[in-house]
Image (tube, helix red, strand yellow):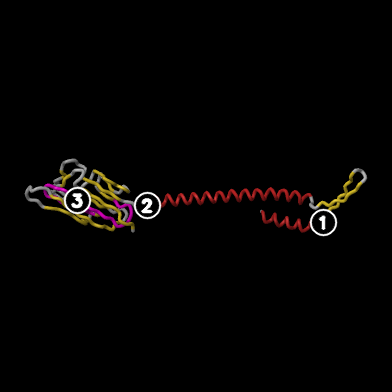
Amino acid sequence: PLPACLLYLSKCLYCMNYQRLNITVKKNDSENATGTQLCHPDIYNFLKEFGVMTEKVRSMEARLKDSETRLKETTTRLEYSETRLKEKRTKVIFSAAGGRGDISIGPFNTETTLAFKRVITNIGDAYNKYTGVFIAPVAGIYYFSIFYHSGRNGTLKLYMNNHLIAMTHHYQPEQRGSKNGGNAVFLQMQTGDQVYVCLGPNSQVWGSNYHTTFSGYLVTPI
Protein backbone atom coordinates (compact mmCIF):
# COMPACT_ATOMS: atom_id res chain seq x y z
CA PRO A 1 0.00 0.00 0.00
CA LEU A 2 1.07 3.57 -0.67
CA PRO A 3 1.28 4.67 3.03
CA ALA A 4 3.63 1.77 3.80
CA CYS A 5 5.83 2.79 0.88
CA LEU A 6 6.00 6.35 2.15
CA LEU A 7 6.96 5.10 5.60
CA TYR A 8 9.73 2.96 4.16
CA LEU A 9 10.98 5.87 2.04
CA SER A 10 11.15 8.20 5.06
CA LYS A 11 13.17 5.63 6.99
CA CYS A 12 15.59 5.30 4.08
CA LEU A 13 16.03 9.03 3.79
CA TYR A 14 16.65 9.24 7.53
CA CYS A 15 19.39 6.63 7.30
CA MET A 16 21.00 8.41 4.34
CA ASN A 17 21.88 11.36 6.60
CA TYR A 18 24.24 9.10 8.51
CA GLN A 19 25.62 6.83 5.79
CA ARG A 20 27.81 7.88 2.90
CA LEU A 21 29.84 5.66 0.63
CA ASN A 22 33.22 6.98 -0.62
CA ILE A 23 34.20 5.76 -4.04
CA THR A 24 37.64 6.29 -5.46
CA VAL A 25 37.72 6.95 -9.15
CA LYS A 26 40.83 6.97 -11.27
CA LYS A 27 41.14 9.58 -14.00
CA ASN A 28 43.82 9.64 -16.73
CA ASP A 29 45.88 7.05 -14.83
CA SER A 30 47.27 9.83 -12.61
CA GLU A 31 44.45 11.62 -10.86
CA ASN A 32 42.37 10.35 -8.04
CA ALA A 33 39.05 11.79 -7.11
CA THR A 34 36.80 11.12 -4.23
CA GLY A 35 33.09 11.27 -4.90
CA THR A 36 30.06 10.64 -2.85
CA GLN A 37 27.19 8.31 -3.78
CA LEU A 38 24.15 9.70 -2.13
CA CYS A 39 21.90 6.72 -2.67
CA HIS A 40 22.28 3.03 -1.93
CA PRO A 41 21.46 0.86 -4.99
CA ASP A 42 18.43 -0.64 -3.19
CA ILE A 43 17.14 2.82 -2.39
CA TYR A 44 17.59 3.90 -6.02
CA ASN A 45 15.59 0.92 -7.26
CA PHE A 46 12.96 1.61 -4.66
CA LEU A 47 12.68 5.26 -5.71
CA LYS A 48 12.34 4.20 -9.33
CA GLU A 49 9.59 1.73 -8.50
CA PHE A 50 7.95 4.28 -6.22
CA GLY A 51 7.85 6.80 -9.08
CA VAL A 52 6.21 4.24 -11.36
CA MET A 53 3.74 3.38 -8.63
CA THR A 54 2.93 7.06 -8.08
CA GLU A 55 2.15 7.54 -11.78
CA LYS A 56 -0.11 4.49 -11.72
CA VAL A 57 -1.95 5.83 -8.68
CA ARG A 58 -2.41 9.20 -10.37
CA SER A 59 -3.69 7.49 -13.50
CA MET A 60 -6.12 5.41 -11.42
CA GLU A 61 -7.31 8.53 -9.59
CA ALA A 62 -7.93 10.28 -12.93
CA ARG A 63 -9.90 7.30 -14.25
CA LEU A 64 -11.86 7.09 -11.01
CA LYS A 65 -12.72 10.78 -11.20
CA ASP A 66 -13.84 10.35 -14.80
CA SER A 67 -15.99 7.37 -13.80
CA GLU A 68 -17.56 9.39 -10.98
CA THR A 69 -18.37 12.19 -13.42
CA ARG A 70 -19.98 9.77 -15.84
CA LEU A 71 -21.93 8.15 -13.01
CA LYS A 72 -23.27 11.55 -11.93
CA GLU A 73 -24.30 12.30 -15.52
CA THR A 74 -26.04 8.92 -15.80
CA THR A 75 -27.82 9.49 -12.49
CA THR A 76 -28.97 12.92 -13.65
CA ARG A 77 -30.34 11.49 -16.90
CA LEU A 78 -32.10 8.69 -15.00
CA GLU A 79 -33.71 11.14 -12.58
CA TYR A 80 -34.82 13.27 -15.52
CA SER A 81 -36.34 10.23 -17.25
CA GLU A 82 -38.16 9.22 -14.05
CA THR A 83 -39.52 12.75 -13.68
CA ARG A 84 -40.76 12.80 -17.28
CA LEU A 85 -42.35 9.37 -16.84
CA LYS A 86 -44.09 10.50 -13.65
CA GLU A 87 -45.34 13.65 -15.37
CA LYS A 88 -46.63 11.58 -18.27
CA ARG A 89 -48.47 9.25 -15.92
CA THR A 90 -50.11 12.16 -14.08
CA LYS A 91 -51.40 13.81 -17.28
CA VAL A 92 -54.80 12.22 -17.76
CA ILE A 93 -57.29 13.79 -20.18
CA PHE A 94 -59.88 12.12 -22.38
CA SER A 95 -62.93 12.97 -24.42
CA ALA A 96 -65.04 10.63 -26.55
CA ALA A 97 -68.24 10.78 -28.60
CA GLY A 98 -70.84 8.24 -29.72
CA GLY A 99 -69.09 7.24 -32.92
CA ARG A 100 -72.08 5.39 -34.42
CA GLY A 101 -72.75 7.68 -37.37
CA ASP A 102 -76.11 9.31 -37.99
CA ILE A 103 -78.13 6.80 -35.99
CA SER A 104 -79.46 6.63 -32.45
CA ILE A 105 -78.21 4.40 -29.65
CA GLY A 106 -81.06 2.50 -28.01
CA PRO A 107 -83.65 2.04 -26.79
CA PHE A 108 -82.79 -1.12 -24.80
CA ASN A 109 -84.95 -3.04 -22.36
CA THR A 110 -82.32 -2.85 -19.63
CA GLU A 111 -79.71 -0.35 -18.50
CA THR A 112 -76.72 -0.60 -20.85
CA THR A 113 -73.13 0.65 -20.55
CA LEU A 114 -72.28 3.01 -23.40
CA ALA A 115 -69.03 2.63 -25.30
CA PHE A 116 -68.16 6.01 -26.76
CA LYS A 117 -66.28 4.79 -29.80
CA ARG A 118 -64.98 8.00 -31.32
CA VAL A 119 -61.99 8.98 -29.17
CA ILE A 120 -61.25 12.68 -29.52
CA THR A 121 -58.33 12.69 -27.11
CA ASN A 122 -57.00 10.13 -24.64
CA ILE A 123 -53.83 11.35 -22.94
CA GLY A 124 -52.73 8.71 -20.46
CA ASP A 125 -54.75 5.94 -22.19
CA ALA A 126 -57.08 5.60 -19.21
CA TYR A 127 -60.27 5.43 -21.29
CA ASN A 128 -61.18 2.24 -23.18
CA LYS A 129 -63.32 2.89 -26.25
CA TYR A 130 -64.29 -0.78 -26.53
CA THR A 131 -65.76 -1.08 -23.03
CA GLY A 132 -66.60 2.57 -22.37
CA VAL A 133 -64.83 2.36 -19.00
CA PHE A 134 -62.37 4.88 -17.59
CA ILE A 135 -59.85 3.42 -15.10
CA ALA A 136 -57.96 5.85 -12.85
CA PRO A 137 -54.18 5.37 -13.35
CA VAL A 138 -53.33 7.40 -10.21
CA ALA A 139 -55.14 8.52 -7.09
CA GLY A 140 -56.50 12.03 -7.33
CA ILE A 141 -59.39 14.41 -7.91
CA TYR A 142 -61.02 13.91 -11.32
CA TYR A 143 -63.60 15.91 -13.25
CA PHE A 144 -66.18 14.17 -15.49
CA SER A 145 -68.91 15.48 -17.76
CA ILE A 146 -71.66 13.82 -19.83
CA PHE A 147 -73.83 15.36 -22.54
CA TYR A 148 -76.43 13.93 -24.87
CA HIS A 149 -78.81 14.84 -27.69
CA SER A 150 -82.02 12.84 -28.05
CA GLY A 151 -85.26 12.87 -30.07
CA ARG A 152 -87.08 10.65 -27.56
CA ASN A 153 -86.84 9.84 -23.85
CA GLY A 154 -83.18 10.18 -22.90
CA THR A 155 -81.38 9.13 -19.72
CA LEU A 156 -77.66 8.97 -19.02
CA LYS A 157 -76.23 7.81 -15.70
CA LEU A 158 -72.64 8.17 -14.54
CA TYR A 159 -71.31 5.44 -12.23
CA MET A 160 -68.16 4.94 -10.21
CA ASN A 161 -67.47 1.35 -9.12
CA ASN A 162 -71.15 0.36 -9.59
CA HIS A 163 -72.37 3.33 -7.53
CA LEU A 164 -74.61 5.91 -9.21
CA ILE A 165 -72.95 9.33 -8.98
CA ALA A 166 -74.88 11.62 -11.33
CA MET A 167 -77.48 11.50 -14.09
CA THR A 168 -79.28 13.59 -16.67
CA HIS A 169 -82.58 12.81 -18.38
CA HIS A 170 -85.76 14.10 -19.94
CA TYR A 171 -89.17 12.55 -20.52
CA GLN A 172 -90.89 13.20 -23.81
CA PRO A 173 -94.30 11.51 -24.11
CA GLU A 174 -94.86 12.73 -27.64
CA GLN A 175 -92.59 13.45 -30.57
CA ARG A 176 -92.03 17.17 -30.08
CA GLY A 177 -88.52 17.93 -31.30
CA SER A 178 -85.13 17.02 -29.84
CA LYS A 179 -83.79 17.54 -26.34
CA ASN A 180 -80.34 17.97 -24.83
CA GLY A 181 -79.05 17.19 -21.37
CA GLY A 182 -75.85 17.09 -19.40
CA ASN A 183 -74.20 16.91 -16.01
CA ALA A 184 -70.72 17.13 -14.44
CA VAL A 185 -69.04 16.09 -11.19
CA PHE A 186 -65.72 16.10 -9.31
CA LEU A 187 -64.72 12.70 -7.91
CA GLN A 188 -62.00 11.60 -5.52
CA MET A 189 -60.63 8.37 -6.94
CA GLN A 190 -58.08 5.74 -6.03
CA THR A 191 -55.85 3.92 -8.49
CA GLY A 192 -57.95 1.34 -10.33
CA ASP A 193 -61.34 2.95 -9.65
CA GLN A 194 -63.70 2.80 -12.64
CA VAL A 195 -66.09 5.38 -14.09
CA TYR A 196 -68.55 4.69 -16.91
CA VAL A 197 -71.83 5.90 -18.38
CA CYS A 198 -75.02 3.89 -18.78
CA LEU A 199 -78.01 4.48 -21.01
CA GLY A 200 -81.26 4.12 -19.07
CA PRO A 201 -83.81 1.47 -20.05
CA ASN A 202 -86.24 2.41 -22.83
CA SER A 203 -84.29 5.57 -23.66
CA GLN A 204 -82.09 6.60 -26.53
CA VAL A 205 -79.46 9.19 -27.46
CA TRP A 206 -78.06 10.35 -30.76
CA GLY A 207 -74.96 8.30 -31.64
CA SER A 208 -73.14 10.60 -34.04
CA ASN A 209 -69.54 11.72 -33.76
CA TYR A 210 -70.50 15.07 -32.26
CA HIS A 211 -73.65 15.13 -30.12
CA THR A 212 -73.34 12.68 -27.22
CA THR A 213 -70.04 12.85 -25.31
CA PHE A 214 -68.20 11.55 -22.24
CA SER A 215 -65.15 13.51 -21.00
CA GLY A 216 -62.87 13.73 -17.98
CA TYR A 217 -59.47 14.74 -16.71
CA LEU A 218 -57.24 14.54 -13.67
CA VAL A 219 -57.46 17.82 -11.76
CA THR A 220 -54.73 17.01 -9.24
CA PRO A 221 -53.02 13.87 -7.90
CA ILE A 222 -53.35 13.16 -4.16
- 11 vs 49: above or below: below
Task: Specify the label residue 183 is tagged with.
Answer: none
Query: How far is mark 2 from mark 1, CA to CA?
Result: 74 Å
The 10 Å Cα crowd at callout 2, few under 14, some 14 to 19, many 20 or more, is: few
Residue drawn at x 70%, y 49% is: 51
- 160 vs 105: above or below: below
Mark 2 sits on what residue? 87
Q: Earlier in the sequence, mark 2 or mark 1?
A: 1
Residue drawn at x 91%, y 47% is: 31
Relative image position of residue 37 (x, y in whole percent)? 82, 51
Q: Earlier in the sequence, mark 3 or mark 2?
A: 2
Quick one: quadrant of the C terminus?
Answer: bottom left
Q: How many marks?
A: 3
Relative image position of residue 12 (x, y in whole percent)? 76, 56
Q: Residue flagged by tag 2: what amino acid is it?
A: Glu
Query: How far is mark 1 from mark 3, CA to CA?
Result: 104 Å
Q: Could you say which is closer to the camera, residue 15 or residue 148? A: 148
Residue drawn at x 19%, y 40% is: 101
Q: Are marks 1 and 3 in contact (CB under 8 Å)?
A: no
Mark 1 sits on what residue? 19
Residue 28 falls left or right of residue 150: right
Q: Residue flagged by tag 1: what amino acid is it?
A: Gln
Q: Are marks 3 and 2 in contact (CB under 8 Å)?
A: no
The magenta region covers 135-159
Q: Could you say which is closer to the camera, residue 132 or residue 87? A: 87
Q: Earlier in the sequence, mark 1 or mark 3?
A: 1
Residue drawn at x 73%, y 55% is: 9
Task: Specify the label residue 147 is tagged with.
Answer: 3
